[in-house]
Image: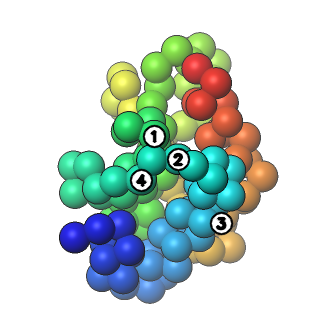
Amino acid sequence: MNVEDYIIKQKSPQKEICQKLRQILFKTFPHVKEELKWGVPSYDNGKYYFVSLKSHVNLGFSMKGLSKEENTLFKGSGKTMKHIEIHSLDEIDEKNIVKLLRLIKNE
């Protein structure tokens, strides 16, 4: 299975959210490495991922090198990975997502 297969298998609206997040990732980082890791789409050797859940999609980020203040931009109790939750296409704030992606990339 590849990332496209993963996305196609999802139900709406998660499928469309995953498609949009993938588009944003490639628009932001055209040459980013994409793979299935831990059974979910993963980018830049695990620096970013998204996972379709029952009622939403989590867009996950590596927390390596971020300050405590920057950590508050994300949800989750993990020490190395945190996420933002997206419940609908309307909730996707592309500017903010790009800002967060670049914040992590620079660390």
Q: Real-space Cα distance between discs 2 and 4? A: 6 Å
Considering only vertical position in the picture, is 1 above or below 31? below
The answer to whether marks 2 and 4 mark residues whose Cβ atoms lie closer than 8 Å is: yes
* Dot 4: element: strand
Report x, y in % for residue 67: 59, 14
Q: Sort mark 4 into few (<14), some (14-19) or many (20+) by Cα contacts within 10 Å.
A: some
Q: Residue at x 38, y 37 (%)?
A: 45
* Dot 3: element: helix
Type of amino acid at the residue the image marks with label 2: Val
* Residue at which label 3 appears: 91
Q: How many marks?
A: 4
The answer to whether marks 1 and 2 mark residues whose Cβ atoms lie closer than 8 Å is: yes
* Residue at which label 1 appears: 44
Q: Which mark is residue 32?
A: 2
Q: Sort mark 3 into few (<14), some (14-19) or many (20+) by Cα contacts within 10 Å.
A: few
For the C terminus, the image quarter is: top right
**Which residue is outermost to the front?**
31
The answer to whether marks 3 and 1 mark residues whose Cβ atoms lie closer than 8 Å is: no
Q: Real-space Cα distance between discs 1 and 4? A: 7 Å
* Residue at which label 4 appears: 34
Type of amino acid at the residue the image marks with label 3: Glu
Q: Earlier in the sequence, mark 3 or mark 2?
A: 2
The answer to whether marks 3 and 2 mark residues whose Cβ atoms lie closer than 8 Å is: no
